[in-house]
Image (cartoon, helix red, strand yellow):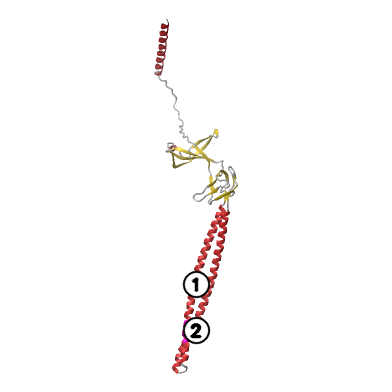
């Protein structure tokens, strides 16, 4: 009896499995059902979903053109600042010393220029004196030559002795020598005057160079005080008191100041496959994790054509305001 009961149960199970299998097979090949609806006109929306960062519309990086140690900080994160307000100062000791040295160099160059100018005036006076001596010697020579010519006439007539002619001839030669010496003195005085003028020009050039060095040192001293270029709020601070900043090769960023946090923009990275459908002026919906239940409306203001490749993925920057 047990065997009969077991066989009957197996047959029953097989029959049930066959029944449900056949039912499922026939249900899969049932007649299809059609859903109909009237034709209407509507819009088809294409959505591009990308991620990005929210940044201020106007943001200024404040750096320094000089190197040194930060000795004072007057603002911190979230500080409200105004244009011209002092943000920080760099130790001005070395710049003050450079300015003092430049001022001393200017004073020395100006003194040298004044001395050169005085030398020029002295040399010009020497030229005038030498020219006067030359004219005096030339007049004496003319007189001696006239006397000598008269002596030649008188000695032919026997009115004077030969020694008088010899004396007047010697005087004429002496007068000629005096003229030659006076001419040489004039030329030497003019040469010294020209040399003094050249030296004065060099002194004036040294004054200009010293003034330029003074302006540079004063500029560096003024740059030791870091001021805000705009009205806004400090969103980033990159230095601390005692930190050394080096501006040898590039300008270090000390602060980042946003003009306002009421006007923000989203800098999104758009995939290369989607950028072709993106146009300036298209509307955008912005979702921020900090406000999960709020969406913001924006407009695509710019699609930048410069691509960025990271890990073989090409993206383009799009700005939404």
SS type, badge 1 = helix
Dividing the picture into quadrants, the one containing residue 97 is bottom right
The image's mark for residue 192 is 1
Q: Position of residue 28 (x, y in %)?
A: 40, 18
Residue 93 visible? yes
**Relative height, residue 224 to residue 236 (above, below):** below
Q: Nearer the viewer, residue 79 or 192?
A: 192
Q: Could you say which is closer to the camera, residue 314 or residue 275?
A: 314
- Main structural element of the magenta stretch: helix, strand or loop? helix
Q: Nearer the viewer, residue 294 or 89?
A: 89
Earlier in the chain: of badge 2 and badge 1, it is 2
Q: Are marks 2 and 1 in contact (CB under 8 Å)?
A: no
Say if the magenta span includes residue 57: no
Residue at the far bottom in the pictured view:
158
State the count of labels. 2
Under tag 2, what secondary structure?
helix
Alpha-carbon distance for marks 2 and 1? Answer: 27 Å
Q: Is residue 171 magenta?
A: yes
Rendered image: mark on residue 160: none
x and y percent of residue 159 in the render?
47, 94
Residue 295 position within the rendered picture, expressed as x and y whole percent measured from the top left: 53, 34
Residue with the most extreme top position: 1
Left or right placement of residue 76 versus residue 168 in this view: right
In the image, taking residue 106 as reference, residue 153 lies left or right, namely: left
Q: Where is residue 21 drawn, in percent x and y?
A: 40, 15
Which residues, given as a range, are shown in magenta?
170-177
Disc 2: which residue = 140
Crowd tier of the residue under label 1, counting other residues whose Cα lies within 10 Å: few below 14, some 14–19, many 20 or above: some
Q: Could you tell me which quadrant the N terminus lies in?
A: top left
Label 2 crowding class (10 Å Cα cut-off): few <14, some 14-19, many 20+? some
Q: Nearer the viewer, residue 143 or 74?
A: 74
Residue 87 visible in the displayed image: no
């Amino acid at each position: 009896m047990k065997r009969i009961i077991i066989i009957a149960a197996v047959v029953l199970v097989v029959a049930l499995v066959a029944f449900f299998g056949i039912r499922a097979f026939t249900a899969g090949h049932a007649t299809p059902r059609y859903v109909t609806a009237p034709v209407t006109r509507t819009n088809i929306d294409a959505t591009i979903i990308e991620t990005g960062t929210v940044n201020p519309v106007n943001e200024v990086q404040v750096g320094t053109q000089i190197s040194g140690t930060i000795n004072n900080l007057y603002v911190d994160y979230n500080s409200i600042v105004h244009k011209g307000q002092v943000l920080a100062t760099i130790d001005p000791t070395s710049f003050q010393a450079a300015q003092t040295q430049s001022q001393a160099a200017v004073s020395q160059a100006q003194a040298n220029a004044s001395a050169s100018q005085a030398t020029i005036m002295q040399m010009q006076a020497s030229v005038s004196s030498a020219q006067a001596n030359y004219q005096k010697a030339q007049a004496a020579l003319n007189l001696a030559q006239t006397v000598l010519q008269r002596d030649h006439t008188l000695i032919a007539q026997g009115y004077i002795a030969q020694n008088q002619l010899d004396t007047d001839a010697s005087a004429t030669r002496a007068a000629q020598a005096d003229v030659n010496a006076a001419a040489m003195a004039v030329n030497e005085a003019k040469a010294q005057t020209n040399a003094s003028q050249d030296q004065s020009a060099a002194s004036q050039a040294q004054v200009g160079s010293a003034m330029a060095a003074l302006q540079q040192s004063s500029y560096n001293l003024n740059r030791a005080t870091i001021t805000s270029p705009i009205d806004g709020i400090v969103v980033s601070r990159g230095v601390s008191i005692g930190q050394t900043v080096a501006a040898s090769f590039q300008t270090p960023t000390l602060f980042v100041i946003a003009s306002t946090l009421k006007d923000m923009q989203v800098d999104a990275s758009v995939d290369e496959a989607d950028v072709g459908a993106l146009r300036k002026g298209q509307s955008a919906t912005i979702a921020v994790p900090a406000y999960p239940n709020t969406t913001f409306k924006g407009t695509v203001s710019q699609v930048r054509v410069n691509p960025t490749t990271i890990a073989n993925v090409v993206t383009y920057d799009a700005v939404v305001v």
